[in-house]
Every structure is written in structure tokens, then in C-alpha cells.
Image (cartoon, coloured by chain):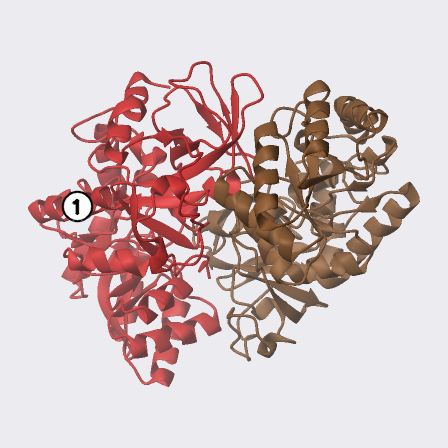
Chain colours: A red, B brown
Amino acid sequence: MSVSRRSFIATSAAATLGASSTAAGGSTALGTQARPADDTMKGVSKWDLDTPALCVDLDALERNIAAMQSRLRALKVASRPHAKTHKCPAIAKLQLASGSIGICAAKLSEAEVFSANGIGPILMTTSNVSPAKIRRAMALRRSNSQFVQAVDYAPNARDLNDAAREAGIVADVVVDVAVGSRSGVPAGDQAIALGQLVDRLPHLKLRGIISYDGGAQHIKGFKARLDQTLNRFAPSLETFEAFKRSGLSTEIFSGGGTGTYNILPRADGVTDVQVGSYIFMDCQYIEIGGESNEQVYDDFLPSLTVVTTVLNTYFPKSITTDAGAKALTLNRPGPWVLGEHEFTYNAGSDEFGVIRYETARRSYAVGDKLDLIVPHCDPVVNEYDQLYAIRKDRVEAVWPIVARGKSQ
Amino acid sequence: MSVSRRSFIATSAAATLGASSTAAGGSTALGTQARPADDTMKGVSKWDLDTPALCVDLDALERNIAAMQSRLRALKVASRPHAKTHKCPAIAKLQLASGSIGICAAKLSEAEVFSANGIGPILMTTSNVSPAKIRRAMALRRSNSQFVQAVDYAPNARDLNDAAREAGIVADVVVDVAVGSRSGVPAGDQAIALGQLVDRLPHLKLRGIISYDGGAQHIKGFKARLDQTLNRFAPSLETFEAFKRSGLSTEIFSGGGTGTYNILPRADGVTDVQVGSYIFMDCQYIEIGGESNEQVYDDFLPSLTVVTTVLNTYFPKSITTDAGAKALTLNRPGPWVLGEHEFTYNAGSDEFGVIRYETARRSYAVGDKLDLIVPHCDPVVNEYDQLYAIRKDRVEAVWPIVARGKSQ
């Protein structure tokens, strides 16, 4: 482990999030339990929650949302945060209230949930290709005029047009231009032809381009990330210029993420960035380094943690906890135990975490609590039905993760 | 990839599960959608389900349950299946109806869900150490006389005794004897002392010993697994003998799993095995080899798959699907695409799967469906709210995964 990560875990993160661990014995006077969201949880100590417990520190969350808005304002682009990260309408509403121009959704079932929970402006970044999903997407557009759908394939554009006609609407679409080879239409001629097709189809309204580079977000070192991101984005930018020359709509030109929020705006014409993880941060992002700190990406504060309970301390240099792969996923690196920079946490067992260590800053007993920064925030959030919104170590609200499991 | 795994994916698994992929276009006359369980799904084709869809083939599931019962009967031990694998009361009921003597639960919230859904005999294999969980466990025991709780720590036994007294009950407990260093009390003197303490405490009733070896289940090669399992289990067996000599209850002596179901019964005194994955199977288990087939563990049939939809075929030797880490987890190896033994499926993206291949047995188009054996069944099931019970490629029932996310 690098010195910088060590000191980060030992000091700055712990300072942000308060006490990193505390003995649990005797501190559960309220007999609190992680039950469905209700007001009876308000005021309960974070350290008395039933574990594993997914918690977000509200002071840090609010600072992250405000910081992103302030930085993007200076860069003259908007934010359109990806809701696949949090799957919580409560957080989407905070983002919109802070000035975000909309949210993104990765899956149709996710978009439906957000729309049903009062979120209007939704850009669905994945194409819907099955007949049933196409019909549902058009039904969603009929009920929510701010729903925009990605398309990356000509036959799919025709199917969408047919379904929009059947639904009696003109549906808003953006062309998804590939960066890499995961999703989207290849930049250049194929993308331009698709834009022209969409523009001609009477029941579709072209709104512009999305172009997201998943591989760029976690490039370590700001300079390398800057160079590679802009290099990889160049074909998308040329496609955008060709759209403009052809008279195609470029009202939306959206891309980027938490790792490139301050890079993509350097490409002329980008309207908004699809930032997701900045609200929570995680081990994967903290490691990439930022513009002002090459070692630790500290543009945003880690706000999301999982509280776990120590179950077993019989074995030398080893601690077993109640948070395994079903609570933390298998992403790497991490999880990191706040306050204990020498701990190696293995979440490889489904139900247990196993910590190995040579030195510890304190001793641990069965029942003690530990607070963990998670490896990768999106899939960890997707393991839980609720998120405890914590202020100064007390529950302020319990947010249902309403779109949890909406992977369809 | 080994030749044996290749031929398994290409032939036997595909034969078991029927067609491995099918074009989706035009076959969705019912406009089916993965919505909450209801009877309107009955009869819908597996290939028309909204994807990613978690499916179990009922013929294979029933054969697996019957095969395990028949083999264990010959070995003169019982089954006490671990419900952490399926989290479905519907499947627990099938297991109990086939002759299982009870189920295991890994977490208290899981045990509560199964008990509330009509499952009586539940052995909770993890200790409950927080004051709130201890109270809840004793409340569960009060409402369900067949609930048995593991203990591995003397202060915890005293806490359980106190809570049982407050609840006005005598609570059934088993001593969890460690194999390895993850959970449980070390075998030998400490375990015997704990058994004697439990035996003395007036509000606890000692029922015996559990001793599970997580590390043994996936040892590749039957002979190596046999030798290591029995070797590692020897201290537990000695502890069991000491319990008997001391007059402590040995009514329950439970351990083992799907990888050792036919090994642990060779240890004298074992009463039952805590098999879990045998109902579904997965890539991890298929690879360990069995007693009669060193290459492929074919004692049980793969019954669990995830159906995914092809989203993108623009890029050479590459297919993008709609099932990523939130649908399949990051466990290795796998997932395996049924019928395509040369495909390498990467579920590393949260929302997308990316297949790389050199040769394919057929061509694929956007909208086509693929059927996947999952890497590791337990955490994949935990990603979904419902399991489609399929017979001859048609939905026979939709089973709510009621204990999904009950990791507390």
C-alpha cells in the first residue's frame, strides 16, 4: 500500500467521517434494527445500526454535490448525474435541486422507477432493443415528456419510430457514439448516417449525441487521464462537428464521468457530464489521483461507507466480520477499514469479511464496529434495500434504494 | 479452457437446458415484462422474458433435490440445506418435502424471513453478537421452537442465556467449531469448555456441534478434496468424540457442503450436511470434478441460468450484452455461454457484458438471447428480486426471492 493511501485512510478519511470504529457493547439502548424505512430510526446512532449497514454521510454528500456544481459552472458545462450510482430518488432530487439539468439511467426499469418517483428529465444511456422494452420506453416517453432514449443502430431507430407512431408520440432520441467497443455506433460515417436517419424518421426527434468512455474514468494520474481521454474522444468530437455541419441537432453533447468531469469540458461543444460516483467516492476512484493531488483523488469526499461488526477474534492477526461479498462485492481494491491503514480486508466469502493484519492501532473484540470505504460504489449500493442518511453519526433519514435490482 | 469444460458447455449443459440461444425479434407477442410475481407470467416463453432474467429449470432442480436425498440416504446422513443459496421459501419447501431435516440460514434477517414464510426447522450457522440481534434471535426462538442458534464465544453464550431468560425461554444452541480461521471456536479444549458452559447455562439447551469447512468445498479433484477435507475435519471429529465422552449433547453434528456431501459422511457421527449449491450448480462447482468424473462435477445438473440480450455487434470478435456485474457478480470463472464454448464473457462492467471470441457456432444479431451458467450461484441469486421457475422453456411459476438482500 502506498504511503499516500495509508495516510489518507489513517487521517483524512477518518477525520471526514468521524470515529472510525467504536465498541458496540452496551450502546444499543434503543434496540435498533435495520427494518424498512420509517421515522423511528431518526436520531439512532450510526454505531447502533444492524450490520452490515450502508451509510452516507450527509455533510460530505452535500459538499460533493455543491462542489461539482461549482466546478462545472466555472467550466461552463452542466451536470446530468448518472442515477445508476445511487438508485435513490431522494438523491436525484438533491442533484436536481442543486442545478443538475437531469439524470441519466442505465436501464429501462431504472428509468421507469425514477419517473414514477417524480423525476422528470431522464436520459437513458442504453439502447432498448427488445420489442417489449421498446414499447415500454415509448409508453414512458408518453407519460414523461422529458424522457430521452439512446439509439445506436439503424433497425432499432426504425423500431423506435414505429413504436412511437403506435403510441401517438414523437420520441426524443440521442445517438450513442462509441468510445471503445462496448456500446454505441462507431464514430464517423456510421454515426452520421444514423443521425440522418433519426432526423428523417417522423416519430423521432433527434436531440444530439451521447458519447461515454467507460475505460477513461479510472486511468491513474491526471496527466495520463487527460491525454488519453481527449485522444479517445477525438472521433466523437469530429462526429459532433459533422452533425453540426449537416444541420443535425447538437443540442445535447453529453459524456464523461467522475474521473473526467474536469477533462471532457475541454472538448468544444460538450454540454454536460454524466458524473455518478462523485457523490459517494470509493476506493477505485480515490486511487486514480486528481489534478491537484496526483496521489489521492480528493476533489470529492468519501461519503459512503458500510458499517460491519466484528464476529471473531480467536485467530492471530485475523478478524472476521459480518460483511462479505453480498455486502461489499468483489471489486478491487478494497474495502478499506477507516483508521486502520495496515489492514487487508478480503470480502471473498459470501457472508463474512476476513481482515489480515500485522499491526493494528487498537485492539478489537467481538461486537466492535468497523467502518469501510467500499471498493466500487455502484454495485455495492445495488446490494441494499436502504441507505442510512447520517449526519454527525446520527440517522437523519432512511432512503429506500427504490431502483435496487432494476438491472432490466 | 480445458477440452472437458468445452465439451460440457457445448453439449451436456445445452442438452439439459434446451436451446442455448434464440433470436428474440418477433417472438414477444405477449409483450411480457419482468414485473412482480403474478400468474400472468405463466406459460410465457423463457426467451421472451425481460432480461437479464434469472431462471431455474424445474426438471433439473427436481432431479438435483431427489439425487441428493437418494445419495445421502445411502450414506446414512441427512441433508440440512443452506438457504443462503436460494433465499426462496418456495425452494426450502421443496427441500423439506423431499426429506431434508431442516434448513440453514447464514444471517438473522434471513432466518426471520424463512420463519415468517412458514419454514420451521432453521439452524442459524452464524453467531449473533450485537445486543439487538441477540434479542431478536431469542424472539425468533420464542415464536419458532425449531430455531437453533450457533455460538462460538463464551461471553456470547452468557449473553444468549440472559436474553433467553428475559424472553422466558430455553434456547437451543449448537457450538460452532472452527475449521480454518474464519468463524467458530478453535477445536479442542476451547470448544469443549464452551460446550460445558452452554450445558450449564440454565436458559440454553446444547444440541451439538456444527463445523463447516468453507475452504474445502472447491478443492479441485475428488481425491485431493477427500484427503484434505477429512484431514482438516479431524480436530472437529476429536472435539465431537470429547463431547460424547463428557456427556455433552451430540444430537447434531453438522457440516459439509455441495463439494463434500459424499466425503463428510465418512467421518463417524456426522448427522447431516449443509449442502447449498447442489440445487443450482455453477461454473465454480462444475470445475472441481466429481468422484466418478474427475474433469466435470456432474453429480448434479446445472439448473440456474441468466438469460441476457445482445445489445451490440458492431465490433469484430465482440458482442455486448445487457448482463454485467450487477446481474452476474465478478466471481470467476465464468459466466459460460451455453452452446458457445469458445466465448470469453467479461462481466466486469456494472451494466454490460462483453464477449470476446475467435469462432462462434452461429452469427448473432442485436436482440438475440444468450443463456449463461453463472459463476457462483449464491451472490448472483442475491442480485434479483425474483426467480423464474421454468419447465420446458415456459414459465411455470415466478418465485419471489424473499430473503434477497437479507445480509444482516
Specify whether residue A243 is in view: yes
Q: Is residue A79 left or right of residue A215?
A: left
- Chain letter of the residue carrying label 1: A
Q: Where is residue B149 in the image (x, y as percent from the top left)?
A: 65, 42
Tell me if residue B332 can be seen. no
Q: Is mark 1 on a helix, strand or loop?
A: helix
Q: Quadrant of residue A213?
A: top left
For the view shown, which residue lies furthest in the right direction? B74
Q: Is residue A255 left or right of residue A408?
A: left
Q: Residue at x 61, y 28 (%)?
A: B154
Residue in the foreground of this view, choosing between B132 and B281: B132
The answer to whether A18 is drawn above or below residue A82 in the figure is above
Q: Say which residue label 1 marks.
A: A68
Looking at the picture, does residue B151 appear above or below residue B136? above
Residue B137, how many percent across, how many down? 58, 47
Residue depicted at x 34% and y 25%: A339
Give the camera-side residue of A381 and A271.
Answer: A381
Most distant residue in the top direction: A358
Which of A320/A271 is in front? A320
Q: Nearer the viewer, residue B98 or B153?
A: B153
Q: Where is residue A259 in the image (x, y as percent from the top left)?
A: 26, 39
For residue A299, which quarter of the picture? top left
Please give the count of numbered marks on the rendered protein. 1
Q: Residues within 10 Å of mark 1 (few under 14, many from 20)?
A: many
> Which quarter shows the N terminus of chain A?
top left
**Amino acid tagged 1:** Met
Residue at 65% x, 76% y is B43
Spot occupied by residue A199 in the image (x, y as percentages of width and height): 25, 71
From the viewer's perspective, tell me whether residue A122 is left or right of residue A158: left
